[in-house]
Amino acid sequence: MPPLPAPRTAGLRVSLLLGLTLTLAACKPQPPPPAAEPADTASAPSVAGQVRRLSAVPAGVELRGKLTAAYGWTDSAGEHVLVLAERQEARGADGAQSATLYAAQYTLGQDRPRRQWMLSDGVTRCEFDASATFDLASIAFPDLNRDGALETVVGYRSACASDVSPNDYKLILHAGKAKYGLRGLDRQGVRWLDPDSGHLTGLPLPEDCSPQGQRALQAKGWEKDFEPPYLPGCYTDENDFAAAPPAFARHMRQQWFALMRHQEDNWLKQQQE
């Protein structure tokens, strides 16, 4: 799909950089978090029995920030650990605030844990409210190319804002050291429920993030609420997947829309409480 133009800075939002040692013997298996919606079983076989939630991580695994979640599994490529950590820094003397997050996959079973990949992202020197958090509903371990080695899917949101508005959202797939991603805006604060009439106002949840699909929604007047080139609930493009197996883009596209629906449902429920 042809790329949309690079987004303009909108509102008070900025996105920048970011920033996961305990012992494996203390690890306690726990059930992994539920997925936002069932994955495409045709392209992503169930691996729930292979992945376990850990309460601690092995010695030698770097942790940058406070542990958010850790997962362990064994596949055809060996024994692995995925660690997720977040860090919220206090405001400095200048009033600026930073929020960072860190994710990394390690392979065990050698003289020491060996890091396969690392992700560091977030918001720095924000003059408003900085946030960077993992979306645990997005964490998944499919085997999309059916080679016995599990891929990892990690989603997270970040923002620098003083209002209730969409966050920057990224959904990242790692296949070994190869990285693919969808990047756009989530659905925070997009639709509002009128307490008297029960009617919803605001941009409907997009079902097509292609340039043509987004322009079709914008043509109906929604561009008055949000600036082009892309709408809340949509990603910018699928360029990362140009040379990837087709199953990768298909799975990630499905997961993106499932997560956006999941978030919108939660947002509307909050308004009814």
Image (tube, rainbow, N blue to C red):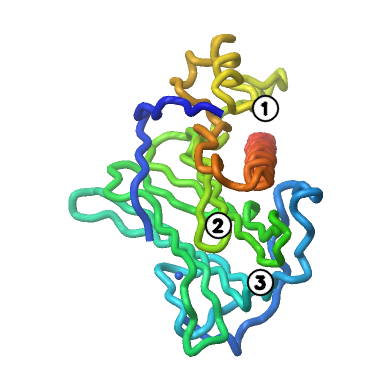
Q: Quick one: SS at disc 3?
A: strand
176 vs 159: above or below? below
Q: Judge the density around disc 2: few (<14), some (14-19), many (≥20) Cα neighbours within 10 Å.
A: some
Label annotation for residue 207:
1
- Placement of the C terminus among the 4 image quadrants: top right
Q: Residue 150 appears at what percent x and percent y?
A: 66, 64
Going from N to C along the chain, the mark reached first, 3 or 1, is 3
24 vs 205: above or below? below
Q: Which residue is mark 3?
A: 53
The reply to whether residue 84 is in sight is yes
Q: Judge the density around disc 3: few (<14), some (14-19), many (≥20) Cα neighbours within 10 Å.
A: some
Contact check, label 3 and label 1, Cβ < 8 Å: no
Q: Which residue is mark 2?
A: 174
Residue ID at (43%, 34%): 163
Residue ID at (62%, 78%): 79
- Placement of the N terminus among the 4 image quadrants: top right
Using the rendered view, name the quadrant where residue 48 is placed.
Answer: bottom right
Q: Residue at the top extreme?
A: 220
Q: Residue 32 appears at what percent x and percent y?
A: 70, 65
Q: Callout 1, which amino acid?
A: Glu
- Relative depth, front residue between 130 and 208: 208
Residue 14 as seen in the image, left or right of residue 75: left
Which of pointers 3 and 1 indicates the residue nearer the eye?
Answer: 1
Q: Callout 3, which amino acid?
A: Arg
Contact check, label 2 and label 1, Cβ < 8 Å: no
Measured Cα–Cα span from mark 3 to mark 1: 32 Å
Contact check, label 2 and label 3, Cβ < 8 Å: no
Residue ID at (44%, 51%): 132
Label annotation for residue 260:
none
Using the rendered view, name the quadrant where residue 64 is placed.
Answer: bottom left
